Image: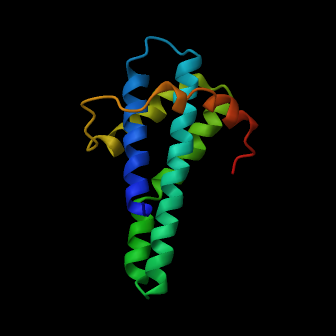
Amino acid sequence: QGPGGERQHLRRTVAEALRRLVQKPRLDDEARDLAALIVFCLRGIDDTVEQATAAWEKRNYYLRADQFRSEWAWTGRMADRLAGALRGSRWDELPSILAQLLPHFADVRVTRMTRGPELWQGAYARLLDDDGV
């Protein structure tokens, strides 16, 4: 699976996590894990953008690479912002951040949940152990 397929897979995962999060009546351990999973997925999407643009730049498609990079620049920024809120226990920022993420995933159709809890369980703890990379 190439960067495009990986990006689509991660976008689907974020869309499902967002749907689960908005349905939660309160912030609990699972909600923190889901939010942390979104951070990891956004970082992964950002990585796929770099992989794709590196390949294009090898072929001298610099303009297309720059355009694509700027089209997806929000992923790294939002990952950092969400990670910062989670690490700093600034739970009041979560609704605003999630609301800003929703439009970026509105085109992802989720008719059936296909991602299981094993995917996000412990993600918050991993994020706290992570050194930000």
Whether residue 93 can be seen here: no
Q: Nearer the viewer, residue 4 or 80?
A: 4
Q: Nearer the viewer, residue 15 or 83?
A: 15
Q: Is residue 18 left or right of residue 129?
A: left
Quarter-of-image position of residue 103: top left
Count of labels in the image: 0
Q: Residue 81: x, y in percent?
A: 58, 42
> Can the viewer see residue 60 in this picture?
yes
Q: Specify the farthest residue to the bottom.
A: 60
Q: Horizontal and vertical percent for residue 27? A: 53, 16
* 36 relative to 112 in the view: left or right: right
Q: Residue at x 44, y 46 (%)?
A: 10
Q: Position of residue 128 (x, y in %)?
A: 72, 34
List x then y, in percent, for residue 9.
Answer: 40, 48
Give the residue at x 28% y 29%: 112
- Which residue appears at 43% of the width and 82% of the height? 62
Q: Is residue 64 left or right of residue 30?
A: left
Q: Name the image quarter holding the N terminus.
A: bottom left
Position of 10 relative to 120 (above/below): below
Color scheme of the displayed model: rainbow
In the rendered view, would you say 20 is above or below 84? above
- The part of the image, by quadrant, that contains residue 28 is top right
Residue at point 43%, 64% (across, down): 2
